[in-house]
Amino acid sequence: MDRLDGPPRLILVTDLDCTLVDHDDPENTHLLRFNALWEAHYRHDSLLVYSTGRSLRSYLSLRKKRPLLTPDIAITSVGSEIVYGGGESMVSDDVWEARLGEMWNRDIVVEETSKFPQLEPQPEKSQEQHKVSFFVGREQALEIMKVDVKLVYSNDYAFDVLPRGAGKGGALTYLLEKLEIEGKQPSNILVCGDSGNDAELFNIPQAYGVMVSNSHKELLQWHEENAKDNPNIFLASERCAAGIIEAIQRFNLGSSASPRDFLDTENFHVENLNPAHEVVQFYLFYERWRCGEVEKSDKYLQNIKSLSSPLGIFVHPSGVEKPIHEWIDEMEKLHGDGKEKQFRIWLDAVSSSHVTSDSWLAKFDKHELSEGKVRSCSTRVLLSCQGEKKKLTWMHIHQSWLDDSCSDDQEKWIF
Ligand code: GLC
Ligand code: MG
């Protein structure tokens, strides 16, 4: 939460499975649209929070399979754990865990719940210190839920027993209180969900809420019974991440134009002097070039040359240094080579800061998927605002491999 100096413009809290992530779409179409939107227009002044029923480990394994951006905060195990940051540096909130521990005795919960033979324990990997989970049918769940701990039923099969203060709503309330103490109350809150364990999120006062179109009937029923007169909660007409983008537009929370939907391949300067938008658009253009989705025309190569300084150098992650314009020439032979390979690029954690009054250093992780394999580079771009027209010019690019991304196949990596 320290990444921003001031209050966030928006705090977007979203469930993962079947909300941000569409398991019926192996191509991640709307997730990638959301990613481009977030990095171009929100990352610099807003907070992204994931709130999931998954354990931390299971969430991290989802991140390996899907192009999920690095959140500022991850609430895992149905609100029983809060972790700040993602990727390299993740810090668990011990105060929250201690607070949950005060009124909770896991052994008693396990013993008491064992008296209900209808409850079939979920596998050991889904059990946590502050979460005891079962599988059970709907009718039996309603009967058992009369006892006094927090009981959450999701997707017509998952039954979680939690400390009373836990749950996705409890964890978010705690985080909002922390932000208030730090003087960082968000201007807007948007919560996003699809199933029973998300219902509590929609009880947060002042929050806007979206139930994605593929929401489970238990969430719709909860809404009917508890929140149907709240104009700030709505059922999207679109699935998963597309429903989240729809909600951003409906509640007027900021731009809802994903660069993936509005890429002007010839002019990246629609929104002047936004380095984050500029880099997101450049890489989308590059993805489309590699996929042969823009025609193989010299005018495009000349156009992107005009975005960069003839003196500009790109330091390739292999260590090879050449003028940016020479690398652009090399793009010619890669036109269309990604077509059959499900080639996709997404940028993560884009930040930019002034180096001088008219130049910026943009930093981000660039991920490139090709034939099911993801390679990643930490990237720095120096951009300068030059000339009368106030356009951004790429002055210098530097990349280094992240994790174990370095490979023999380096000539197919440009930019
Ligand atoms: C996730 C968790 C599971 C939990 C369910 C509902 O699927 O893996 O343990 O019961 O969410 O919260
Ligand atoms: Mg879900």
Image: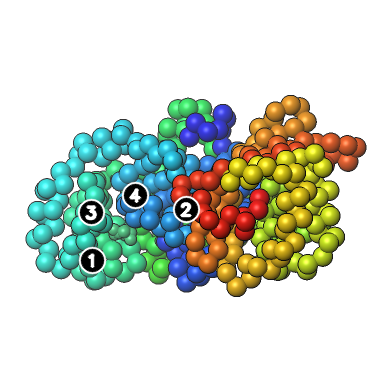
Taking depth in this image into account, of 349 and 199 the one nearest to the observer is 349
SS for dot 2: strand
Q: CA distance from mark 1 to mark 2?
A: 24 Å
Is residue 79 shown left or right of residue 89? left
CB under 8 Å between callouts 4 and 3? no
Expressed as whole percent of the image width and height from the top left, the position of residue 24 reads 47, 72
Classed neighbour count for the residue bearing mark 2: other residues with Cα under 10 Å, few (<14), some (14–19), many (≥20): many
Classed neighbour count for the residue bearing mark 1: other residues with Cα under 10 Å, few (<14), some (14–19), many (≥20): some
* Residue with the mark numbered 4: 56
SS for dot 3: loop
Is residue 151 shown left or right of residue 24? left
* Residue with the mark numbered 3: 127
Image quarter for ligand 1:
bottom left
Taking depth in this image into account, of 276 and 253 the one nearest to the observer is 276
Residue 88 in view here = yes
Colouring: rainbow
What amino acid does circle 4 point to?
A: Leu
